[in-house]
Amino acid sequence: MVLTTIDLNADLAEECGDDAALYPYLSSANVCCGRHAGGVAAMKKAVSAAIRNDVVIGAHVGYEDRENFGRIEVEMDYDALRKLTFDQIHDLLDVVNQANAELKYVKPHGALYHRMGNDPEQAAAVVDAVAEINPGLHILVPDTDIIKSAATNAGLTVVHEFFADRAYLPVGTLVPRTVPDSVLHDADAISERVLEWLAGGEIAANDGTRISITAQSICLHGDTPGAVESAASIYQRCESAGYEIKSWLAND
């Protein structure tokens, strides 16, 4: 894997971080669609900021579970989840269209993101809703055969990401947040890890073994303490190393 440009995305409009300070370092914005957090006012603010900072806009869809911030799995059948996904994307599309902007991708949030990687029905429900709205939308999802199969059936383009601020298990999935040290906070260590991954496509898992990760984007959680410092460190060190922070969709 040889990269000269790399996308830096963050979860925004969740009303729990310093979003305004993050935008200068981002190339893609996962704008919360108001179900697991945020709301219409937050979406409008996020879209306006994305336009001002020339940041690509994506829809961040999740379970309708504000109490648990969308981080607990919810049992839903195909039709219910498809409708929930469809409605969320349209809620953001209304805001995007009013701002004369463009929605270019969809990224599931939290528990839905991970459930889709292992559940064919939930994966199909989400990707089918996306395809019904616009088959040109990309989906930013886990790298699993289940999701790739569902996306292929729906005619969607799949994109994967590397989590800058999360620890990985030896199997290549994220360490659950319930496990100590699953979330990283040291900005210098996070940016060093990013450069290590960019250089060789590998990082150390939480047991020290080396794992390979294929991705076109780097995710930084906007609600994580120190997110702004980490984003700044990643941005500055990537530029110094000759990488350009740029969305994979910038010229789409």
Image (cartoon, grey):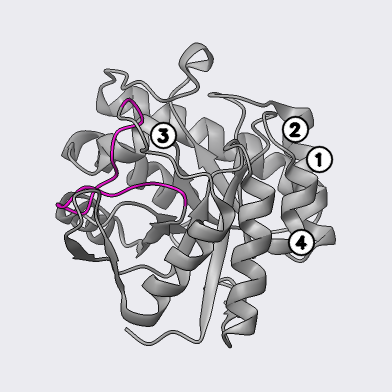
Q: Which residue is mark 2?
A: 42
Instruction: Please name the amino acid that badge 3 sits on.
Output: Gly
- Closest to the camera, between mark 4 and mark 2, is 4
Would you say residue 137 is visible in this rendering? no
Q: Which residue is mark 3?
A: 110
Secondary structure category for the residue under label 1: helix
- In this rendering, the answer to whether 114 lies above or below 158 is above
Instruction: Please name the amino acid that badge 2 sits on.
Output: Ala
- In this rendering, the answer to whether 69 lies above or below 200 is above
- Label 1, label 3: how many angstroms apart (C-alpha)? 22 Å
Q: Nearer the viewer, residue 184 or 244?
A: 184
Q: Which residues are magenta?
A: 165-178
Q: Which residue is mark 1?
A: 45
Q: Earlier in the sequence, mark 4 or mark 2?
A: 4
Looking at the image, which residue is at 28% across and 56% down? 151
Q: Quadrant of the C terminus?
A: bottom right
Query: Residue 176 lies in magenta, yes or no?
Result: yes
